[in-house]
Image: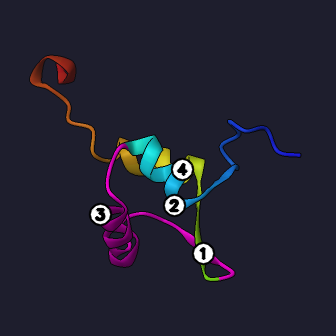
């Protein structure tokens, strides 16, 4: 059995929505646009935890103080 916090863990859409605090509709749009990697397994989206974390990190804003 896979560790529940393993980066290879597959998450459902509902789990991703809870994890990042965004709407299902916005998550679907990100998948369709190619921004958020997902797998379609048995007509259901699955998301690798590591991919979700990397996607979220892509939105990080670095302040001037941090970049110096």
- Residue 13: assigned label: 2
Residue drawn at x 19%, y 24% is 67
SS for dot 3: helix
Q: Position of residue 13 (x, y in %)?
A: 51, 60
Mark found first going from the N terminus, 2 or 3: 2
Q: Outermost residue toward the left?
A: 64
Inter-mark Cα distance, 4 to 3: 14 Å
Residue 36 pos. (x, y %): 42, 63
Helix, strand or loop under label 4? helix
Q: Residue 54 has which mark? A: none
Q: Residues within 10 Å of mark 1 (few under 14, many from 20)?
A: few
> Which residue has dot 3 on it?
26
* Residue extent of the magenta highlight: 21-42
Q: Crowding near pointer 3: few (<14 within 10 Å), some, many (20+)?
A: few
Sooner in the amino-acid sequence: mark 3 or mark 1: 3
Where 37 falls versus 62 (above or below)?
Answer: below
Instruction: Give the residue number, with chain letter if any, for mark 1.
Output: 44
> Tag 1 or tag 4, which sits nearer the N-term?
4
> Mark 4 — residue?
15
Spatial CA span between label 2 and label 1? 8 Å
Answer with the quarter of the image where residue 20 lies.
top left
């Amino acid at each position: 059995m896979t560790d529940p916090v393993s980066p290879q863990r597959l998450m459902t859409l509902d789990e991703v929505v809870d994890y990042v605090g965004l709407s299902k509709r916005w998550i679907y749009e990100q998948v369709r646009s190619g921004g958020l990697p997902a797998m379609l397994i048995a007509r259901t989206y699955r998301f690798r935890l590591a991919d979700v974390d990397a996607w979220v990190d892509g939105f990080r804003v670095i302040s001037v103080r941090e970049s110096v």
